[in-house]
Image: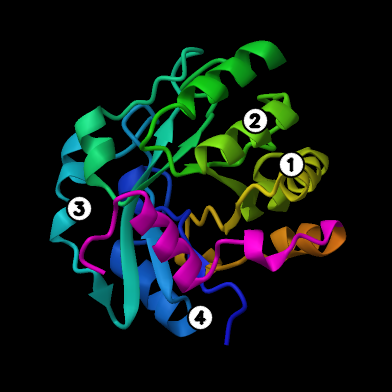
């Protein structure tokens, strides 16, 4: 039985630079013992990202497929230093959850003050669920301010396995610092594979190394069925579960 059977940061071919279908990802979850699978394709500001109509039609996907609970989300892009996201409110409201992230093809990296202001303002959005890969050194942040704001707004901070695996070189020290601050302020954490191919779904090995080093209490880690489902229900989502 997997210790952390939830992965909400995954991509399908609709993201433009990922290489597995939704069903291939779900079949990988079935094989790996992932109980809750979240599809979080890139929003439209990402080159090649999903069109708005795609997110509006996620409702046609069954809630349970091959025994896996399927959550229908998005990875929204922070597109300016006022914290705006590239999905209209009606879409944000309709999906099960939303990750927000910086990508340098969607916004030019700013100063630590500009980046932090953008994230803080974005977290005032009531439809933000998770702050994605915030350890990226390309977008330096005041991590203490960000983690405290996440605690205030009950937003989950992601530790991103792909970042630690080399997709965002230099993330390790930042992610470790973020984890330490989450422990200090009792801010919720989620491990995300950021999978762009089905074989990497549920791969959290490098994230778990940080958890062990920092000694993160299990109650803060949201990668279990009950924790993530209850969290989203408390946000007014998942009425059909």
Residue 184, percent from left and from top: 78, 45
Quickly name the residue at label 4. Answer: 32
Instruction: Point out the tag, 2 or 3, that comes first from the N-terminus.
Output: 3
> Which image quarter is the C terminus in?
bottom left
Instruction: Point out the tag, 1 or 2, that comes first from the N-terminus.
Output: 2
User: What kind of element bears circle 2?
Assistant: helix
User: What kind of element bears circle 1?
Assistant: helix
Residues rendered magenta in the picture = 214-241
Q: Bin the neighbour count of mark 1 within 10 Å (Cα to Cα): few under 14, some 14-19, many 20 and up.
A: many
> Which image quarter is the N terminus in?
bottom right
3D distance between C-alphas at marks 2 and 3: 30 Å
Q: Bin the neighbour count of mark 4 within 10 Å (Cα to Cα): few under 14, some 14-19, many 20 and up.
A: some
Q: Nearer the viewer, mark 1 or mark 3?
A: 1
Q: Nearer the viewer, mark 4 or mark 1?
A: 1
Q: Nearer the viewer, mark 2 or mark 3?
A: 2
Instruction: Point out the tag, 4 or 3, that comes first from the N-terminus.
Output: 4
Quickly name the residue at label 3. Answer: 58
User: What kind of element bears circle 3?
Assistant: helix
3D distance between C-alphas at marks 1 and 2: 9 Å
Is the Cβ of the residue at disc 1 closer than 8 Å to that at disc 2?
yes
Residue 116, percent from left and from top: 63, 20
């Amino acid at each position: 039985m997997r210790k952390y059977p939830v992965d909400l940061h995954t991509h399908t071919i609709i993201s433009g630079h990922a290489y597995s279908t939704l069903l291939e990802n779900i079949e990988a979850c079935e094989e790996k013992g992932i109980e809750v699978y979240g599809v979080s394709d890139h929003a439209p500001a990402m080159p090649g990202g999903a069109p708005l109509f795609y997110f509006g039609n996620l409702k046609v996907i069954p809630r349970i497929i091959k025994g896996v609970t399927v959550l229908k989300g998005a990875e929204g892009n922070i597109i300016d230093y006022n914290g705006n996201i590239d999905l209209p409110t009606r879409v944000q409201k309709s999906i099960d959850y939303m990750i927000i992230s910086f990508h340098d093809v969607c916004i030019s990296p700013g100063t630590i003050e500009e980046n932090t202001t953008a994230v803080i303002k974005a977290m005032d959005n009531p439809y933000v669920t998770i702050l994605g890969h915030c350890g990226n050194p390309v977008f330096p942040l005041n991590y203490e301010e960000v983690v405290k704001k996440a605690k205030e707004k009950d937003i989950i901070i992601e530790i991103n396995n792909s970042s630690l695996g080399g997709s965002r070189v230099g993330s390790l020290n930042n992610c470790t610092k973020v984890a330490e601050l989450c422990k200090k302020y009792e801010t919720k954490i989620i491990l995300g594979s950021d999978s762009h191919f089905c074989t990497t779904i549920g791969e959290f090995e490098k994230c778990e190394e940080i958890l062990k080093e920092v000694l993160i209490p299990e109650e803060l880690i949201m990668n279990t069925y009950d924790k993530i489902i209850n969290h989203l229900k408390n946000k007014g989502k998942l009425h059909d579960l």
